[in-house]
Amino acid sequence: MKRVVLMALVGVLVLAARGFAQPVGTLETLREKTAITDQDRQQIRTWATTLAENLVANKDPDRRGMVAARDAFIVEGRKEGRSAAFYQAFGEEAIAALKAAEKKAVSQDARVNLFLAVAELRRVEGIDVLRAAIEKDPYPAARYWAAKGLAQVADAVVEKNTPRLELDIADSIAKVIDTETSPVTLYQLFDALGRFDHERAHDVLADAAAKVVTRLIAADPIASQVEDGIVKSLQKAYTREVRPEAKTRLLSAFATMCAAIMPPTSEPSLMSNLNASLEMITGEKVGFVATDTPIMQKLALLEWVEKFVREKKIPKRPLLPPAVEQTLKDILGTGTAPTP
């Protein structure tokens, strides 16, 4: 994620900062074992349960013990330097312990650090708890780390060829897209969707993009990056999609972006990237010139909308921002804008 997005998190994720956590013990003697015995697994389970309890129940004024527990999970959960047997056993036991502890995590500090740990472990076993968090957690910072966790585990889901998990994640995102207002969280949710090829993920992506871009203001740095990420995800989905009706939905989402994005944009290349994606997926061009003024670039994006409507590639023209509607009325001199 770009620097501006990370900087936006500093105010709400102070406890995520590292550097003052102290070691709380490791499972070093087990890390390279090629076979994990029942006794070994019990040792891992006891270690993970104790750390999870420390994470959610720590009362230190500076939360030093909470952060130390969180970091210990992340350090032990690294894949590098661990045998396949240890990595698998540790992941299962760590996620199980964190899931059990989540029920006792009441404060924002505890929940943020718990979901940060689950996110950084990047285990498919943690998907259920991450999905529940993005759907129901009351704290925006906790939902952010849950969303980031889903984005970070997405590649493992694809690698394991588990379409059911892709569907489940897409369903959870669909449930929250109307209510989630944090741009940094939306960034992660769209990142997750963009990594999947499941039909449901493509459909949710198209519908969610069409909704979200009408709520974002491209002059905002984070919102502009969210929109740029949506462009990339839509392009990937469109090029891999084979269902004609799904391609139409994705193209409609592109058209909504062309209509909704208004200059000035914080991301200088946003409109150019949107045009380039449309040129790539359609093999066609409109009057877009990268060196034109932002206003002329906006008018060129509207050419895409009219082109898609005229050629019946999308069922209807998306709603235009009021300022654009009025401009079209003035250009046409009719007092009414084109009928959607």
Image (spheres, rainbow, N blue to C red):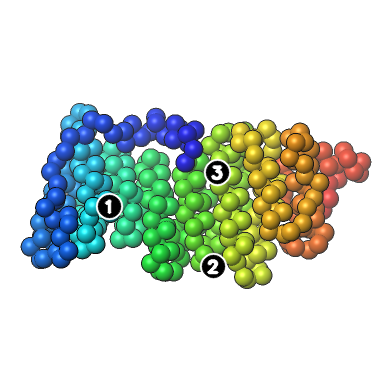
Numbered label tally: 3
Residue lying furthest bottom = 243
Q: Are marks 1 and 3 in contact (CB under 8 Å)?
A: no
Q: Amino acid at mark 1?
A: Glu
Label for residue 199? 2
Which quadrant holds residue 335?
top right
Label 3 and label 2: CA atoms lie apart by: 22 Å
Residue 22: percent from left, percent from top = 17, 35
Residue 213: percent from left, percent from top = 61, 46
Residue 244: percent from left, percent from top = 66, 70
Return the disc, 2 or 1, that comes first in the chain's sequence. Answer: 1
Q: Residue at x 75, y 63 (%)?
A: 313
Q: Is residue 184 left or right of residue 265?
A: left
Q: Judge the density around disc 1: few (<14), some (14-19), many (≥20) Cα neighbours within 10 Å.
A: few
Q: Residue at x 77, y 36 (%)?
A: 292
Q: Amino acid at mark 3?
A: Val
Q: Which numbered disc, 1 or 3, marks the residue closer to the eye?
A: 1
Label for residue 80? 1
Q: Are marks 2 and 1 in contact (CB under 8 Å)?
A: no
Return the disc, 3 or 2, that comes first in the chain's sequence. Answer: 2
Q: Please give the residue where the numbered disc 3 appears in the rendered image.
A: 226
Residue 99 visible in this rendered orientation of the protein: no
Vertical position of residue 149 compared to residue 331: above or below = below
Q: Quadrant of the C terminus?
A: bottom right
Label 1 and label 3: CA atoms lie apart by: 32 Å
Residue lying furthest right = 333
Q: Amino acid at mark 2?
A: Glu
Comparing 89 with 9, the one in front is 89
Residue 258 visible in this rendered orientation of the protein: yes
Q: Is residue 28 left or right of residue 229?
A: left
Return the disc, 1 or 3, that comes first in the chain's sequence. Answer: 1
